[in-house]
Amino acid sequence: MVKLDHLNISVSNYPNSRDWYVRYVGLKVEFENIDAGVGGLSGDGDAELILTQAKLPARERDCVLTFQCDSVHGKYDELSALGLPFVHPPMNVVWGYGAELRDPDGYAVRFWDKATMPGYKDG
């Protein structure tokens, strides 16, 4: 058996990115070493998102983070009310149906849900 355990992304400011993912995405801190600028965040799934503070040119930030939520429309409304700008609201896109915004370092962050994703079958 093989399963994804964690994904590591480089961020320019660990505390800023940690706080953003905790506040807006709803992840929780599993571990961190603030002095080293590294920490692990998790949601309801098995994989952790590891944030590592490092200098990285913007052109190398090509990772897309996709989060399943209960309601993509609800998440969009919630985050829009907090003033977060979205790349696009919930809509049909090449990868299915969902909304997209950018994190503090410019990574694409996408939200989707089972109810609105065309062709999604549970199990």
Image (cartoon, grey):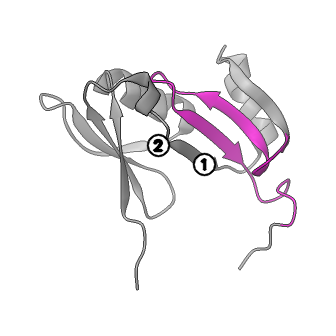
Residue at the image position 60 percent from the left and 48 percent from the top:
67
Instruction: State which quarter of the image contains the N terminus.
Output: bottom left
Q: Which residue is mark 1?
A: 67
Q: Secondary structure at mark 1?
A: strand
User: Local crowd at mark 2 within 10 Å, few (<14), some, or many (≥20)?
Assistant: some
| Residue 50 image position (x, y, % from top left) | 33, 45
Q: Which residue is mark 2?
A: 27
Residue at the image position 75 percent from the left and 31 percent from the top:
76
Bounds of the magenta segment: 92-119
Instruction: State which quarter of the image contains the C terminus.
Output: bottom right
Residue type at numbered disc 1: Phe
Residue at the image position 45 percent from the left and 34 percent from the top:
22
User: Local crowd at mark 1 within 10 Å, few (<14), some, or many (≥20)?
Assistant: some
Q: Is residue 66 magenta?
A: no
| Residue 97 image position (x, y, % from top left) | 82, 48
| Residue 3 image position (x, y, % from top left) | 42, 73
Q: Give the number of marks.
A: 2
Residue at the image position 13 percent from the left and 32 percent from the top:
36
| Residue 117 image position (x, y, % from top left) | 82, 56
Give the camera-side residue of 113 and 102: 102
Residue type at numbered disc 2: Leu
User: In the image, is residue 96 above or below residue 59?
Assistant: below
